[in-house]
Image (tube, helix red, strand yellow):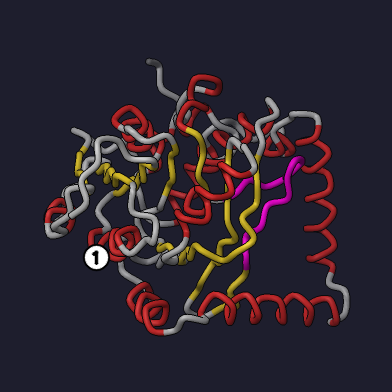
Amino acid sequence: MMSREKPTVSVLIATYNKADALKYAIESVLWQTFENFELLVIGDGCTDHSEKVVAAFDDTRVHWHNLPENTGDQSEPHNEGLRRSNGKYIAYLNHDDIWLPQHLEMLVEYIEREQADFAYSIMEWIYPDALSYPVIPDYPDAPLPPEATQTMHRKDIINEIGYWRRPWECYSYPRADYFRRAQFIGKKFVLVPMLSALKFGVNPKDYSALTIQPKYMDIVRNDPYFAEKELGKMLANAIHELDNPIKIKRLREQYSLQVKRKMAKRAIDPARIRFWVRPGKRMRDWAKHFGLDSSKFDRKSS
């Protein structure tokens, strides 16, 4: 095992009672071609066998810490990870997502070469029974920010924008709020033009259930052209969609994105387009959809 005094990248995985999927997320960190990292797995008051899953990896770069109680969101686990991190850069990986092997290598290369504050790659949303699609935010006036799983940023950015806010403080998701705060003060986001992150849809009937991560881990291991093939399929789907008759739903979405882009350009949170919605509602709705405790996202008095 390589030894080093200080890692270049601190990888943060916030997790809650999803041990079976967590195993694959950790594996996808450990197969990275860029090896100078530490991995901080922060449990949000986990009560399942997540700690045993982490301990099974015989790697001194992997560290486990479990918060004393469940906070209901990745905000506080990420903040705990930020406080414990030693790296120059912070990279996030959701506990049920996976990275392709060159993810960290390419993000470090681009964030340093472009002297950027944030770097993000192309991410693919994968569902068992629906078409996959990419997430490719368009900066500097991106109406939608990247997902945490595809993003890296300089650690010292917290000196300017602070830590992740809790759900009841956000009109959108805490992740979107965090990245938008950086966007609105002019921080530089750079796209790494390669597919390097896979995000999996959650089973709405069982939040903790493993979905198709094992299948995709095997494919990535055995097919060196996996990323190129996936990008090709998504490009073909996009072209075919343009060839199809115009759909009212698509026009509405395009119009909404243009309005949100104009808001982002003026440093106004696009989530405020629904001005009648109070902070925390997005996360309350999300929790209810997956049968989780939504009361944790109510505004707190403290």
Which image quadrant: the C terminus?
A: top left
Residue 284's spot in the image, x, y percent?
47, 42
Q: SS at mark 1?
A: helix
At horizontal 49% and vertical 42% (from top left) the residue drawn is 283
- 89 or 80: nearer the viewer: 89
Up-down relation of residue 180 to residue 248 (above or below):
above
Which residue in the structure is indicated by mark 1? Answer: 20
Q: Answer whether residue 73 is visible to the viewer in this image.
A: no
Up-down relation of residue 208 to residue 299 (above or below):
below
How busy is the neighbourhood of tag 1: few (under 14 within 10 Å), some, or many (20 plus)?
Answer: many
**In the displayed structure image, the side of residue 126 where residue 81 appears, left or right:** left
Dominant SS of magenta comes to: loop
Which image quadrant: the N terminus?
A: bottom left
The boundaries of the magenta stretch are 134-146
Is 75 within the magenta? no
Residue 256's spot in the image, x, y percent?
80, 50
Is 139 within the magenta? yes
Q: Answer whether residue 1 is visible to the viewer in this image.
A: yes
